Amino acid sequence: MARTPLLMGNWKMYKTVGESRSFAESLAKQSAALGASVEYAVCAPFTTLHVLRVMLPSQVKIGAQNVYPEKEGAFTGEIAPPMLVEFGTQYVLAGHSERRTLFGETDDLIGRKVRAIVDHGMRAVLCVGENLTEKESGQTNAVVAGQVIAGLASLSASQVAESVVAYEPVWAIGSGKTATPEDAQSVASEIRKLISEKYDASAAEKVRILYGGSVKPNNIASFLSQPDIDGALVGGASLDATSFADMAKAVGGAQA
Ligand SMILES: O=C[C@H](O)COP(=O)(O)O
């Protein structure tokens, strides 16, 4: 069964409402690049979700970068799943390395976020990846496996099948360095094998695995052409509409 490729931008803490409007207008002019066989999404700051939902080409889904795992309550500064649903949010990132390292998010909290995202009918994008020290000491697969198991722990096999895992080596994020497509494929293949063992073959076959870390228009196809890599989670290169459209064209080509 073929998995639908997913090109997902993560805008991080970039773009005001005005800048988001300009992005949407520019991408709308280039919407011919958005082929029907690929799924597109932008994970944007909360303040821009409404304008993006209204203005982005309809092929591009709305994603959020974070959520708090409670329906409502006295959690100052946090955002609840129903608030995201109301904006038409379909994807939510959980466990991005910047959340893990800068904000101290633990595997336990990330697992609760994944559970809350799925419970509210959105799709979780569980981000995993090793840092440089872990890579250099040969721990990549062990670190990634631990994060995958903990992040998905509360989901059933059919819920895992509908979720997304983004493999993002921490040392490749925003650094201009990427994993080689072969190394990224090797980790993606290990993730799929692990999901088959922990859940079932159907979940492993259906779950989409993305690569992230310094993906650009000129290298995205080399990742998407790997058998276990189903898309990309793109930071910096997703901020410019023409760059996003160029990646969309490259993804279409890689899957053709
Ligand atoms: O979520 C996206 C990743 O952090 C990758 O960011 P980057 O494409 O700027 O390296």
Image (tube, helix red, strand yellow):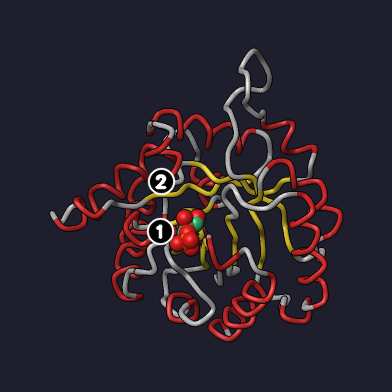
- 206 to 219, vertically: above or below: above
Identify the residue at horizontal 38%, vertical 34% (top origin).
Answer: 107
Residue 213 horizontal/vertical position (percent): 42, 63
Q: Where's the C terminus, which quadrant?
A: bottom right
Q: Are marks 2 and 1 in contact (CB under 8 Å)?
A: yes
* Category of crowding for the residue at label 2, using alpha-carbon neighbours closer than 10 angstroms: few (below 14), some (14–19), many (at least 20): many
Q: CA distance from mark 2 to mark 1?
A: 9 Å
Q: Secondary structure at mark 1?
A: loop
Q: Would residue 66 appear left or right of 155 to someone viewing this image?
A: right
Question: Count the marks: how many?
Answer: 2
Residue pushed farthest right? Answer: 54
> Is label 1's Cβ within 8 Å of ligand 1?
yes
Label 2 C-beta lies within 8 Å of the nearest ligand 1 atom: yes
Query: Toward the viewer: 3 or 129?
Result: 129
In the rendered image, residue 48, in percent from the top left (x then y), is placed at: 75, 47
Residue at the disc numbered 2: 97
Q: Earlier in the sequence, mark 2 or mark 1?
A: 2
Q: Amino acid at mark 1?
A: Ile
Residue 42: quadrant of the picture: bottom right
Residue sitting at the far left: 137
Across and down, in percent, residue 207 comes to 50, 57
Q: From the image, tell me which residue sits under label 1.
A: 173
Q: Amino acid at mark 2?
A: Ser
Which labelled disc corresponds to residue 104?
none
User: At x 66% / y 59%, what residue is drawn?
Assistant: 41
* Figure check: 61 above or below 116: below
Question: Residue drawn at (39%, 31%), measured in percent from left and top?
Answer: 104
Q: Is residue 111 above or below residue 231?
A: above
